[in-house]
Amino acid sequence: MLGKYPIIASVTKDDQLAKVLESDVTRVNLMTGHIGNLEAIMGQLHRAGKQVYVHLEMVGGLGRDAHAVAYLAEKFKVDGIVTTKSNSIAAARQAGIKSIQRIFIIDTAALQTAVRMINSIQPDEVELMPGLMPRVIKELKSMIKQPLIVGGLIRYEQEIVEALDSGADYISVGDPSMWGGL
């Protein structure tokens, strides 16, 4: 049922790794682990055919500068990064990997600031948090050219449908039951 939607697995806990390996999702936003076990995690996920985007601010032991991004690309062969830091987007581009700019919209000023930043730094994709704002999804999608990922607080299939109908390209969820293939 849920397998028909463009789902990205947000892996936030170590115990979700086995579940995502068994799932049908092809993309993983990795938000758990640390520099010491990242090589093993990346190996498992890549062998399972998953594209892996490492969240710079959530995986332990990673720096937040261009050297850390280059190291992730060279040593761990990450497919991309997820970050709230705009300077890391340029570092990802320089390292030859994809970038997802994660933004949090809490009011109109935050939306306007986010659009200016996105248009300036040009990430490959944008992730809007929280993902339960159909009107904001429509507005943001009309103001940017990047694919739009929405995530955060999504728990039901109807919320996925509503977000996609509002213009989202992908849905990022942390609930393994929504990843399919389990």
Image (spheres, helix red, strand yellow):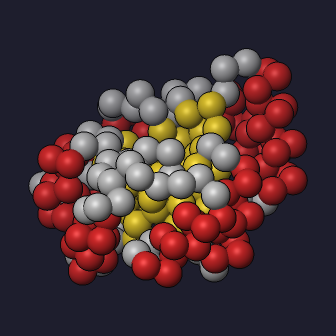
Q: Which residue is depicted at the point 51% across and 73% down?
A: 71
In the displayed structure, does residue 66 sit left or right of residue 140?
left
Task: Tell me where residue 26 appears, x and y as whole percent.
Answer: 35, 68
Asked whether the viewer can see residue 88, the reply is yes
Residue located at (29% from left, 57% from top): 3
Pick the residue in front: 20 or 75.
Answer: 75
Asked if one can make out residue 169 in the rendered structure from this viewpoint, the answer is: no
Going 19% across and 64% down the picture, which residue do you hit? Answer: 21
Where residue 23 appears, as percent x and y from the top left, is: 21, 61
Query: What residue sits 87% from the left and 53% below the top?
Result: 120
Figure check: 110 above or below 96 = above
Rendered position, 159 above or below 56: above
Residue 59 placed where, x, y %?
A: 40, 50
85 vs 180, nearest the viewer: 85
Please indicate whether residue 167 sits to the left or right of residue 37 in the image. Answer: right
Residue 89, located in which quarter of the rendered image?
A: bottom right
Quarter of the figure with residue 156 = top left
Seen from the viewer's position, the closer of residues 5 and 132 is 132
Quadrant location, the C terminus: bottom left
Residue 114 to residue 99: above or below: above
| Quarter of the rendering containing residue 30 | bottom left
In the depicted view, which residue is nearer to us: 97 or 51?
A: 97
